[in-house]
Structure formats: structure tokens, C-alpha cells
Amino acid sequence: MGPWAERARWFLTTRGTLVGLALLVAGAILLGSVGIAYAGSPTATTVTEQQAVETFDLELATSAVVTGETTLFAPGERLAEPPVYLAAATPVVDLSVTSTVPDDRLVTVTQRVYLVTRAVEDGEVFWTERRLLAGETIEVTDGTHTTEGALNVTEYRNTRLAAVASEVGTAGRVETVVVAETEVDSGRYADRLTVETPLVTDAATYRFGDQREASTTRATPVERTVPAAREVSGSRLAGGTLLAIGGLGIAVLGRRESDPEAAATASRVRYGEWVSTGTVGRLGSNRVSVRTLGDLVDVAIDSGRRVVHDPDRGIYVVLDDGVTYTFVPRKRTLANEE
């Protein structure tokens, strides 16, 4: 057996049980703290969730069919969302208002598209005229519906717009906007969306603004109580388990190694430099027994002697001036040794 193994055996023999119990207690404390933390009542929190979410969308689209004299486009060709319309080629513009609603229920939709003419001065509207181009109310079950209207832009520019501009004169400027509106009722929510885009005309062209969409989302806030998560420290759980298992193992090994002969063997390794092996004769009557081999080694050191170990008889002896100091493992006895 190597020196390190012998030292380990000596440690287990003399300190193993105590150290093992200490580790076992430390592990139990760690595991107990984990148990207390887990068993404690966590603080509940209140969270707000959005339920019954519904989204409603509105879009205004434009297109025109080529009906006028032009060499740029084929007669009957439909132009969709060009950056500019040529009045001579496409005098009439088609306006499409599309509402998108939840498709899992019946939704009542009212859609309208208006042509609005207004006079403005210093940012304030002092006169307005609202003309309905198309409108309807319908029950939608498939999630979408489109309402279509048309406007003869050339006719409007040459007649009504020209007349209003003439009457307003220098009192302000005249603006034209197209307004699309939708009113929705899903049975759970009712809402209204509006899109307003400018219509800019001149002698040869007309165009619409870019912002032609609107959207809204409705939901019902619901509060619910959520228990806080139980947090168990993985490091404390693992550490406590390892300490408990390690302490139990060391205690068991220490117990196994702590018999008297094992203790004597371990001590023999520890005090080997002061112990010689030999044969001990009959012991005299002037004899002193000591409790441990360490005590006997102390006697030998103090008297300048060596400890003699008789392996056949299992005794350790120091002879000093007629006095015999002995150490015998507890499983042995000095009966009949005289």
C-alpha cells in the first residue's frame, strides 16, 4: 500500500467519522434551506391580458379605364394606382373602399366614399361641401367587403370646382379631398375608421395622396392572478446533496476503519519513523499501559528511546530504566504475556 493510501486510511481512522458527520450536517442545512424556500408561499402577481382581440382595416384604392383619345395607352386598359392620371386618357376614376373585419363572426359594415370641396384661409375651413359618391350597409361573414364608386374628374374640375374657385376668389384657396369612411359592428365592438386623401387637379392631370389606409385593434383587458414561480437554487440543491452523500460515505468509511487494529495500523504508518519492528520478550511487572500509540511515541521521544513493535504479539513497547511502557490495540490483551 502506497504512502498516500496509508495516510488516507489514517485520516479515515482518526478523523473520518467526525468529518463525515460535519459534512452530513452541512449538506442537511443546505437541503433544508432549499426545502424551506420551495415550501414557502410565493407572492402572487396580477397581470392584465388582452382577450377577444379584433382588428378592423380600411383601404381606399383608385384605378381608371382608358376611354379618351391617347396614344400612350390601349383603349379599355385599366390603370391601377399610377402616380398621376392623364385627364384626357382617363377622365373617370374608380374609387374602391375595402373593409377587412374578423372572419369568424358576422360583422355589420357601413361604407361610404365622399367628394369634399372646401374653402380654406389661414388653415381654417370657412366653407365645405360634401358629396356622396357611394355608400351601403352590409352584413359581412367572410371577413372583407368592397364598395365601389366613380368620379368624372374632368367634369368636376370644369364645372363645380371652377364655379367654387370663381366665387371664393382671393378670399382663400379651394381644396378637394376624397374621404372614405367605414362603421363596423361585430357584436362585441363598434368602431369607425376614416381615410382622407387630397385630389389635386390641373388642366391635364390629376393625382391622389399616398396615405389611404387606416387600421384599429380592439381588445378586452382581463386581469388574472399568476402565482410567482418557485425558484429552487440548483447550486444549493446540488451542493447539499453532494455534501450529504460525501459526508455519509466518509462517516461510513471512517466507522469501518475505526476498529482498534485498523487504528493501530494507521498510527503505525503515521509514527513509522519512531517505530522499529522486533521481538519483545516476557514483560516485567513494572509496566505502564498507555491509551494510544501516539502517547507511547511521546514517551519514546521524551526518553530518547524507540518504540518496538512485536507483530506476532501485536504489542508496542518502550523500555526505559526498568519501566516497560506498552500499547496494545483494544482487541488484544496482555493476559498471559508476562
Image (cartoon, grey):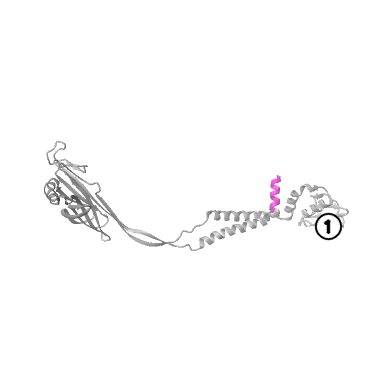
Residue 165 drawn above or below residue 28: above
Residue 331, horizontal then vertical, whole percent: 76, 56
In-front residue for pair 118/252: 118
The residue positioned farthest toward the front in the image shown: 170
Q: Secondary structure at mark 1?
A: strand
Residue in the image at 53% along x and 62% along y: 36
In the displayed structure image, the side of residue 232 where residue 8 appears, left or right: right
- Magenta stretch bounds: 1-12
| Predominant SS along the magenta part | helix
319 left or right of 67? right
Is residue 115 shown to the viewer in this render? Answer: no
> What residue is at 62 percent from the left and 59 percent from the top?
25
The quadrant of the picture occupied by the C terminus is: bottom right
Residue 215 part of the magenta segment = no
Q: Which residue is mark 1?
A: 288
Spot occupied by residue 242 in the image (x, y as percentages of width and height): 58, 53
Question: Front-most of 328 and 130?
Answer: 130
Amino acid type, residue under disc 1 in the picture:
Val
Is residue 216 at all visible to an observer of this figure? yes
Q: Residue furthest right?
A: 322
* 308 or 229: nearer the viewer: 229
In front here: 151 or 53?
A: 151
Residue 295 percent coordinates (x, y): 78, 55
Residue 6 falls inside the magenta stretch: yes
Locate the N terminus by quadrant. top right
